[in-house]
Image (cartoon, grey):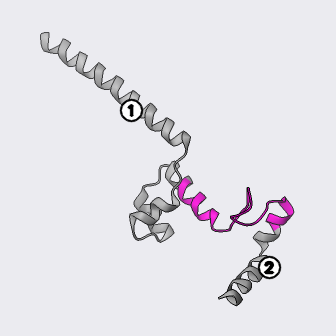
């Protein structure tokens, strides 16, 4: 197994993306603060597609995720997502109140 890991590391070190990473001064590895791992791109793609409004079923088709749990593993929810959800709820509740008041007024006309 160690031999396979060494081969994979050697193969990665010869890839163009790794050369770009080195030139940009981006560290490599999960255990390194700010470290880049090629697989991080999969998380980024999944999250950005969702934020762009692409339906989750379409994202799953593109990424090959067959079960919801895998989609969720690669999808990152951040503070902007939670803020947007709260804003959407607030907007909904405000419009709901307006609609209810309008309904009550129209009922008397």
Indicate the position of residue 44 as horizontal and vertical percent values. 60, 58
Q: Point out the residue furthest to the top here.
A: 109
The answer to whether the residue labelled 2 contacts the one labelled 1, judged by CB atoms less than 8 Å apart, is no
Report crowding for label 2: few under 14, some 14 to 19, many 20 or more residues within 10 A (C-alpha).
Answer: few
Indicate the position of residue 87 as horizontal and vertical percent values. 45, 31
Residue at 74% across, 84% down: 6
State whether residue 57 is above or below residue 102.
below
Is 28 magenta? The answer is yes
| Side of 40 relative to 104 (left or right) | right
- Judging from the image, what secondary structure is the residue with disc 1 in? helix
Q: Point out the residue furthest to the left here.
A: 108
| Side of 10 relative to 49 (left or right) | right
Residue 61 visible, this angle: yes
Residue at 49% across, 53% down: 50
- In which quarter of the view is residue 105 placed? top left
Extent of the magenta region? 20-47
Residue at 46% across, 59% down: 72
Indicate the position of residue 81 as horizontal and vertical percent values. 51, 42
Q: Nearer the viewer, residue 46 or 106?
A: 46
Report crowding for label 1: few under 14, some 14 to 19, many 20 or more residues within 10 A (C-alpha).
Answer: few
**Which quadrant does the C terminus fall into?**
top left
| Side of 59 relative to 43 (left or right) | left
Residue at numbered disc 1: 89
Residue at 86% across, 63% down: 23
Residue 52 visible, this angle: no
- In which quarter of the view is residue 38 placed? bottom right
Residue at numbered disc 2: 14
- Judging from the image, what secondary structure is the residue with disc 2 in? loop
State whether residue 54 is above or below residue 19.
above
**Which quadrant does the N terminus fall into?**
bottom right
């Amino acid at each position: 197994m160690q031999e396979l890991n060494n081969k994979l590391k050697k193969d990665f070190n010869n890839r163009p993306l790794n050369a770009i990473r080195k030139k940009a001064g981006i560290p490599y590895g999960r255990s390194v603060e700010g470290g880049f791992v090629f697989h991080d791109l999969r998380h980024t793609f999944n999250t950005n597609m969702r934020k762009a409004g692409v339906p989750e079923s379409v994202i799953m088709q593109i990424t090959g995720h067959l079960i919801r749990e895998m989609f969720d593993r690669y999808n990152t929810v951040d503070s902007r997502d939670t803020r947007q959800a709260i804003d959407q709820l607030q907007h909904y509740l405000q419009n709901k109140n307006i609609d209810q008041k309008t309904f009550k007024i129209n009922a008397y006309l």
